[in-house]
Amino acid sequence: MTMRYWVFFLLVLPVLFASDQIRIKDLELKILNGPRNGAAYVSIYNGHAYAVTLYKVEVEPDVFDRVELHDHVSRKDENCTEFMEMIEIPEMEIAPGATLFLQPGGKHLMLMGIKSALCQFKKLKFQFLFKGKDSKFQQAIEVDIPKSPRCTT
Ligand SMILES: [Cu+2]
């Protein structure tokens, strides 16, 4: 293979190795009837001896416009009353031996733009993409789509 083909090959097929040191569990979807967007909560354990960074989540089949990483931050309005606001963040770091809990009111996954195609499926595969010390890897988990009134009409 020439160099040129090799580069092309790498760009087109960015298949990353799975890591058995990353354990993902309790994935839960919150998909309500009204809103355009949903949320997902999960726990991710990092068994590596180094910190890893979650930088992207992809879902198959393609039933959301995109998945964003979100956090809640505390803000104050003009009356100095505190309120929580959701913001998109570029990545989430997990210390060695630590578990990252994505949960309501804290860091979470935002399922942006739920497509009507969602109702054709029973399960989704969430692919979590990480950066490690000097490598990238991924880990997948399957989840049942919760029964939602948005799929009954
Ligand atoms: Cu959010």
Image (tube, rainbow, N blue to C red):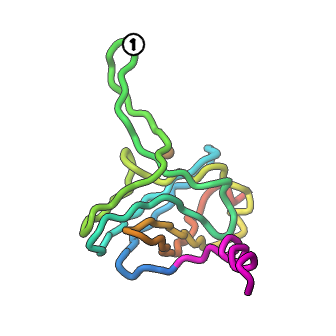
Name the quadrant containing residue 58: bottom right
Q: Nearer the viewer, residue 101 or 144?
A: 101
- Residue 8 pos. (x, y %): 73, 73
Residue drawn 41% across and 70% down?
Answer: 134
The residue stretch that appears in magenta: 1-16
Inspect the magenta stretch and tell me whether residue 79 lies in it. no
Residue drawn 29% across and 75% down?
Answer: 47
Of the 4 image quadrants, the one containing the N terminus is bottom right
Inspect the magenta stretch and tell me whether residue 12 lies in it. yes
Farthest residue to the bottom: give it. 1
Amino acid, disc 1: Glu
In this rendering, is residue 19 above or below 72?
Answer: below
- Residue 146 pos. (x, y %): 55, 64
- Residue 39 pos. (x, y %): 51, 53
Q: For mark 1, give the secondary structure.
A: loop
Q: Nearer the viewer, residue 95 or 45?
A: 95
Q: Nearer the viewer, residue 98 or 79?
A: 98
Residue drawn 50% across and 43% down?
Answer: 88
- Residue with the mark numbered 1: 78
- Residue 101 pos. (x, y %): 34, 59
Q: Nearer the viewer, residue 51 or 39?
A: 51
Farthest residue to the front: give it. 3
Q: Dominant secondary structure of the magenta stretch? A: helix
In this rendering, is residue 69 above or below 119?
Answer: above
Name the quadrant containing residue 116: bottom right
Q: Mark 1 near ligand 1 (CB under 8 Å)?
A: no
In this rendering, is residue 21 above or below 66?
Answer: below
Residue drawn 48% across and 49% down?
Answer: 90
Binning the other alpha carbons within 10 Å of mark 1 as few (below 14), some (14 to 19) or many (20 upward) gives: few
Of the 4 image quadrants, the one containing the C terminus is bottom right
